[in-house]
Amino acid sequence: MPEQTAHSLPSYLNPDELGPWGDYLEQVDRVTPYLGKLSKWVETLKRPKRILVVDVPVELDDGTIAHFEGYRVQHNMARGPGKGGVRYHQDVTLSEVMALSAWMSVKTAAVNVPFGGAKGGIRIDPRQHSQRELERITRRYISEIGLVIGPMDDIPAPDVNTNAQTMAWMMDTYSMNVGVTSPGVVTGKPISIGGSLGRVQATGRGVFVVASEAMRDAGIAINGARVAVQGFGNVGGTAARLFHEHGAKVVAIYDHTGAVYHENGLDIPALSEHARETGGVAGFADADTVTPDEFWALETEILIPAALEGQITAKNAPSVRARIIVEGANGPTSPQADDILASNGVTVVPDVLANAGGVTVSYFEWVQNSASFYWTEGEINERLEAIMRDAYASISATAAEHKVTMRTATFITACSRILEAHEIRGLYP
């Protein structure tokens, strides 16, 4: 990774342990030569606007008091309120949340919705806690970060290990604290309290839409195309279902329980039912088991990493034999792996474009909350697909113009929009 100058690296980070934030910084460095006069503002992209680290104390069911570390990072809000999910995971770090918030800034700008980038997290293993404990933890976390969130300030959403119920607790806690029901403070809520139809499947649907566009550009028919998916939750599961319904052969699924494979295509509805009943894809009768290394090396037309970040690295990238990678997860491919894949002729449709369907429908939900007027699911899906296709077409044209990868083209488009907002607004005072 290029050496970071003293003025580009916040003092609270160890330069030898940058983690995901280091990957993001390298992506910004790679795009800087294409920003022209806007490059004078590029340091703005390398420093989060605001970082809040909070203690989240809670009384557990057995009467003991436990403390968890919580984060809310607002990376950039030049184009609108902060927007980004909250994840509950035992390995959450500040570096990770910073990077995710920055990628949200890029993502919202890439699809041109009027939000900035933010992200949150609590370092906790939710599997070790009851539903009542998770509710108390959620409510305390929102009470702690309540001073920086709000419908016009920063709008959380679901992420890893959080869901519509989590958002309901968040919305209720914030509303009780401000004294008025405020559905627009979060997105991804249950429909009964202002959630949007189509939100749960939105990210996976967006992945399918941009994958279809990339396949068309590459001359690959969906019918009969081989697809492998890492992750079988809302994102990977929805993408797999849509590919299956359109005639593709989803030959492999890899989740936290293992990887299963069938050369003629897995029965996705049956596999979904098996995963619901058993907790994962492992043990599915009508499939073979493959190792993680074998999964990444499968010969496919489409590979969709839709789990956590850091999955495709310099170690396994040389073995990837997919023609197109469509990133459903955030940050699944390292910069070094990007270079290897590009040299091997593998097209990567980056996360900041491919998985932007979720934030796009979150924007629709926020708009509907503001207007108290709600659209049909058909309207939601139609608007989503139009935005995703337009974004893909614009970024694909930029990639061709500059002869760069889709990731660099996405960063050129998004960073230009963010920095143009900074230049037009200027500095105050």
Image (cartoon, helix red, strand yellow):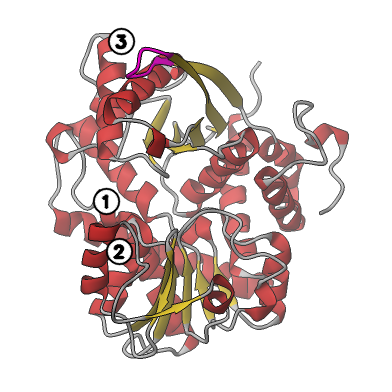
> 258 or 321, which is in the foreground?
258
Where residue 208 appears, as percent x and y from the top left, is 36, 69
Residue 378 is marked as: none
Q: Secondary structure at mark 2?
A: helix
Q: Which amino acid is tagged 2?
A: Thr
In terms of sequence position, does the residue under pointer 2 or pointer 1 come before the other? 1
Q: Position of residue 152 (x, y in %)?
A: 38, 25
- Rounded to the nearest angstrom, the CA distance separating label 2 from label 1 is 9 Å
- The image quarter containing residue 370 is top left
Q: Is residue 237 visible?
A: yes
Residue 92, by quadrant, is top right
Closest to the camera, between mark 3 and mark 2, is: 2
Dot placed on the residue nearer the N-terminal end, 3 or 2: 3
Q: Which residue is mark 2?
A: 238
Residue beneath the point at 24% across and 9% down: 179
> Magenta segment, principal secondary structure?
loop
State the image coordinates of residue 41 (x, y, percent, origin top left). 72, 39
The kind of residue tagged 1 is Val
Contact check, label 1 and label 3, Cβ < 8 Å: no
| Tags 3 and 2 touching, CB below 8 Å | no
Q: Specify whether residue 60 is painted magenta.
A: yes
**Dot 3 corresponds to which residue?**
177
Q: Does residue 124 lie above or below 249 as drawn? A: above
x, y percent for residue 401: 63, 73
The answer to which of marks 1 and 3 sits earlier in the sequence is: 3
Marker disc for residue 200 = 1
Marks 2/1 in contact by CB < 8 Å: the verdict is yes
Residue at the front extreme, as displayed: 62
Instruction: Name the residue: 69% across, 35% down.
Output: 44
In terms of secondary structure, where does tag 1 sit?
A: helix
> What residue span does the magenta drawing correspond to?
58-64
At 27% from the left edge and 71% from the top edge, which residue is drawn? 271
